[in-house]
Image (cartoon, rainbow, N blue to C red):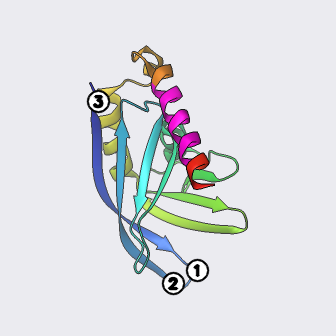
Amino acid sequence: MRESVQAEVMMSFLVSEELSFRIPVELSYETADPYAVRLTFHLPGDAPVTWAFGRELLIDGVGRPCGEGDVRVSPVEPDSLGAVLIRLQVGGDQALFRSSAASLVAFLDRTDKLVPLGQEASLADFDAHLDEALDRILAEEQSAG
């Protein structure tokens, strides 16, 4: 059975040191992909953009700087649970978002109630779901190309 947790939070999209604006961000977690969380950003004038990355990265990033490469998460101030920065990068382009730690912790707490951290592998047929998803992606790429 597929179960999920969703939440909508307001985050600040930090365009520069002088310019930022608040946007709604949908957070989602599904038992079908128990290692990942998804953040869907609704930027003004653009189609929604969804990023998926490790739930554990988000959990760890609330308390300390974490991540390498495309996704980095860190508290704004060390030893403080006030706000969290989420940096997303594709090539030379990057986007920086600021969220209240409380909103993220509340969402993560709900995901932990659904699938406790460390218990992701116990979900039946996870490998089958992964194989199905990879097959679907490959089929879509072949039909598009």
Identify the mark nearer the N-term, 3 or 1.
3
Residue ID at (38%, 23%): 116
Quick one: 19 or 142, which is closer to the camera? 142
Q: In the drawing, does residue 3 fall left or right of residue 84?
A: left
Could you tell me how far apart the alpha carbons at marks 3 and 2 are, in whole angstroms?
A: 40 Å
Could you tell me how far apart the alpha carbons at marks 3 and 1 are, in whole angstroms?
A: 40 Å
Q: Which mark is residue 19?
A: 2
Which residue is labeled 1 in the image? 16
Check the image and report above or below for 69 versus 130.
below
Which residue is labeled 3 in the image? 2
Q: Secondary structure at mark 1?
A: loop
Q: Find the magenta span and give its range.
A: 129-140
Q: Between tags 3 and 2, which lies in front?
A: 3
Q: Residues within 10 Å of mark 2 (few under 14, many from 20)?
A: few
- Residue 137 position within the rendered picture, expressed as x and y whole percent measured from the top left: 54, 42
Does residue 119 show up? yes
Check the image and report above or below for 12 versus 16.
above
Quick one: 62 or 92, which is closer to the camera? 92
Could you tell me how far apart the alpha carbons at marks 1 and 2 are, in whole angstroms?
A: 5 Å
The answer to if 134 sits in the magenta stretch is: yes
The quadrant of the image that shows the N terminus is top left
